[in-house]
Image (spheres, rainbow, N blue to C red):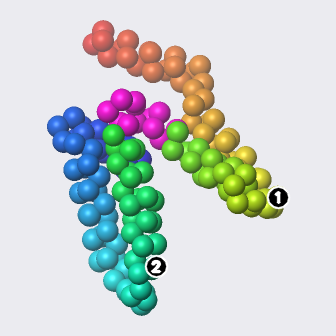
Amino acid sequence: MTNTLLPVKLLKTESSATVSGWGLLVSGLSLLVLHPAMPHVPNTVPVWVCLGSVIVLGTIIPFQLMNNSLRYIKPATASLLDAFEPLSATIGSVLVFGLAMTPLDVIGSLLVVLAAMALNLSPKWRHKLISARLNRGQTE
């Protein structure tokens, strides 16, 4: 929610790179305050390459793309699409890496799909209730 709803107004005046950068900096510093223990990481070139890859490919680029998409689509749509990310990662892992799915994995995947569908369901009684409230507010 915070990744899609909070920056909408800010993205109208600032670039998505600025919003992503500040968001990642504040969240990183907050995590450092809450959990200050630093693990010992070997100081080798492969470790730094892997760390840089995770930071750039797994964090900066996805957050940048997500924030930039909020200029063109509604936050609710972005959140819904984001809900399918774990499912698409699982399917990709099965197809590309040959991941063997357990029954619990299949149940979890089905729950992700059901949760995303539930977010889109809007009962008729809810529409009537909202319309009644809007109409009542206009006549007062």
Indicate whether 120 appears above or below 114.
above
Residue drawn at x 36%, y 29% as measured from the top left: 72
Q: Which residue is mark 1?
A: 103
Indicate whether 140 appears above or below 100.
above
Q: Secondary structure at mark 1?
A: helix
Q: Which residues are magenta?
A: 69-80
Q: Position of residue 130 (x, y in %)?
A: 45, 21
Q: At label 1, which amino acid type do we have?
A: Pro
**Nearest the camera: 76 or 100?**
100
Q: At label 2, which amino acid type do we have?
A: Pro
Badge 1 or badge 2: first in the primary sequence: 2
Q: Is residue 73 magenta?
A: yes
**Nearest the camera: 42 or 127?**
42
Image position of 133 (left or right of 7): right
Q: What separation in Å lies between label 1 and label 2 (alpha carbons)?
A: 36 Å
Quadrant in the rendering for residue 35: bottom left
Quadrant in the rendering for residue 124: top right
Quadrant in the rendering for residue 32: bottom left
Q: Secondary structure at mark 2?
A: helix
Q: Taking the image as drawn, is residue 39 in sight?
A: no
Residue drawn at x 42%, y 73% as measured from the top left: 49
Q: Which residue is mark 2?
A: 46
Which class describes the residues within 10 Å of circle 1: few (<14), some (14-19), or many (20+)? few
Q: Residue furthest right?
A: 103
Q: Taking the image as drawn, is residue 128 in sight?
A: yes
Q: Position of residue 118 (x, y in %)?
A: 62, 36
Q: Position of residue 98 (x, y in %)?
A: 76, 59
Q: Is residue 124 magenta?
A: no
